[in-house]
Image (cartoon, coloured by chain):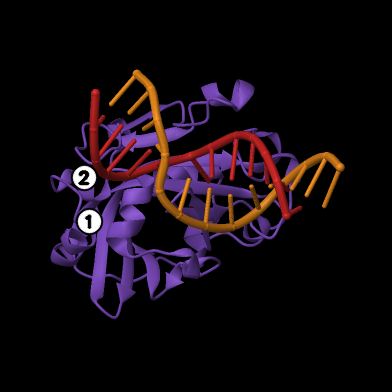
Chain colours: A purple, B red, C orange
Amino acid sequence: MPNQLKPLPKSFYNQPTLQLAQSLLGKLLLKETDDGVTGGFIVETESYIGPDDRAAHSFNNKRTKRTEIMFGEAGRTYTYTMHTHCLFNVVSGSIGQPEAVLIRAVEPYTGQELMEKRRPKAKSKRQWTNGPGKLTKALGITMDDYGHGLDQRPLWIADGKMVASSQIVSGPRIGIDNAGEAKHYPWRFWIAGNAFVSR
DNA sequence: CATCGGATGGACT
DNA sequence: GTCCATCCGATGG
């Protein structure tokens, strides 16, 4: 178990997006608010690789107020609203390359009482954080975090537990049926057998 | 302005 | 399995 919650350096994010999506598995995602610190181990991610990926918001280098942050440096926060939920992504790729990694699920680690309180409708602990909209609610991540650098509080990523490459599984991404060819790309990664993976 | 469509989650049949 | 809450960005007039 991690004995410190020190943010990973910016340099951690300078790796190809498909690789970063796997490196993020097992890392700790943390958020501090007035109510306290909550955090969980990342157990499921998805890559979105800008120009050629029809499923990405930045497909065709589409540059808008919403996607703007993805054109900037890696290691910042891309949040956006999906229906009634806020979804959290880590910006990746070099400057000018609009890429990101969506965090789809985490395993609760610290601040669990607070997480439970923030997820009153969940019927079990597993449901606190086993989906991209659920984990932001449990951790208190909101649209106010858009653009925040992940190498500092109040929203940061720290070293977590070791994940062997043999434990990492991949497959098609979720919820992008309308993305043509891209819907088959095996750009979703998760820790095999982990109970908090969304599906 | 009007309309439409989601990288979702929860309630319900 | 179905339905829909409720919001933002994108698009067209």
Question: Helix or strand or loop: what does disc 2 sit on?
Answer: helix
Q: Disc 1 sits on a residue from what chain? A: A
Q: Which sits earlier in the primary sequence, circle 1 or circle 2?
A: 1
Percent of width and height locating residue A88: 45, 54
Q: Which mark is residue A86?
A: none
Task: Give the side of residue A59 with respect to residue A191, left or right.
Answer: right
- The answer for how far apart the CA atoms under marks 1 and 2 are is 8 Å
Percent of width and height locating residue A113: 13, 65
The residue under label 2 is A127
Q: Nearer the viewer, residue A25 or A118?
A: A118
Task: Give the side of residue A73 with respect to residue A199, left or right.
Answer: right
Q: Is residue A1 above or below residue A26?
A: below
Callout 2 amino acid:
Gln
Q: Is residue B13 above or below residue A189?
A: above
Q: Nearer the viewer, residue A49 or A18?
A: A49
Residue at (29% x, 81% y) in the render:
A34
The residue under label 1 is A119
Q: Disc 2 sits on a residue from what chain? A: A
Callout 1 amino acid:
Arg
- Does the CB distance between marks 1 and 2 fall below 8 Å? yes
Task: Tell me if residue A27 can be seen.
Answer: no
Residue at (43% x, 64% y) in the render:
A142
Percent of width and height locating residue A105: 32, 45
Question: Helix or strand or loop: what does disc 1 sit on?
Answer: loop
